[in-house]
Amino acid sequence: MRRKGWLLAAFVANIALVGAAAEASTFLAMSREELVAGSAAVVDGRVTQVRSFWNAEHSAILTEALVRVDDVIVGEAPTFVKVLTFGGTVGRMRIEASGFPTFAKGERQLLFLYREPADGSVRVNGYRLGQYRIERGVDGSDVAVPMADAGTRLVRADKSFELPRTERLEDLKASVREDGERLGRRVP
């Protein structure tokens, strides 16, 4: 699913560029355990820089976010990691790809990350399913808000999948660590 996504992204981007309404992308749904299993690392970090640029062929706009890793939940990650995603703005040209990760400087996020074998770049596993924004809840505790939204269509053969819900950050981290341990992954 991850590796074939760029082709889908190019299709969605082309629709957006010609002015047709592209409100949703369709992705294969992944459970949290599947996200953990397919991720090199799950991290809690803060976006320190965001830059968008044309790819080498000048056929797509990509965005690279520099994330300072504050907590490694599963796996291993350096203190800073560059995360690549499809879409962004360069000059007056903008490519919006519904369902793909987005980043804003200063934002704190929990990310399921994998390394793309084809080019070595680090990407978010499961697209927006593997991305949570961390905010302060009404009770003062940190909450993890899923970035997957109504604009993300998810399909699964057993049709039992539900979009993730906002939950306390510590509960999410505990669940991810449990999945990691069950899967024999490194859990710091």
Image (cartoon, rainbow, N blue to C red):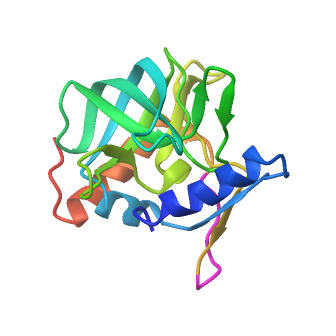
Residue shown at 61%/27% (left/top)?
89
Give the left or right position of residue 91, taking residue 173 as reference: right
Query: Nearest the camera: 104 or 53?
Result: 53
Give the left or right position of residue 161, taking residue 65 as reference: right
Magenta residues, as a range?
157-164
Place of residue 147 in the rendered image (x, y in percent of width and height, measured from the top left): 60, 42
Q: Is residue 25 above or below residue 149?
A: below
Give the left or right position of residue 127, taking residue 186 as reference: right
Place of residue 76 in the rendered image (x, y in percent of width and height, measured from the top left): 17, 42
- Res 143 visible: no
Q: Which residue appears farthest toward the bottom when viewing the image?
A: 158
Residue shown at 36%/24% (left/top)?
66
Q: Which residue appears farthest toward the front when viewing the image?
A: 57
Place of residue 35 in the rendered image (x, y in percent of width and height, measured from the top left): 39, 59
Q: Quadrant of residue 57?
A: top left
- Res 72 visible: yes
Q: Quadrant of the N terminus?
A: bottom left
Q: Quadrant of the C terminus?
A: top left
Q: Main secondary structure of the magenta part?
A: loop
Is residue 158 highlighted in magenta? Answer: yes
Is residue 14 highlighted in magenta? Answer: no
Place of residue 98 in the rendered image (x, y in percent of width and height, measured from the top left): 67, 48
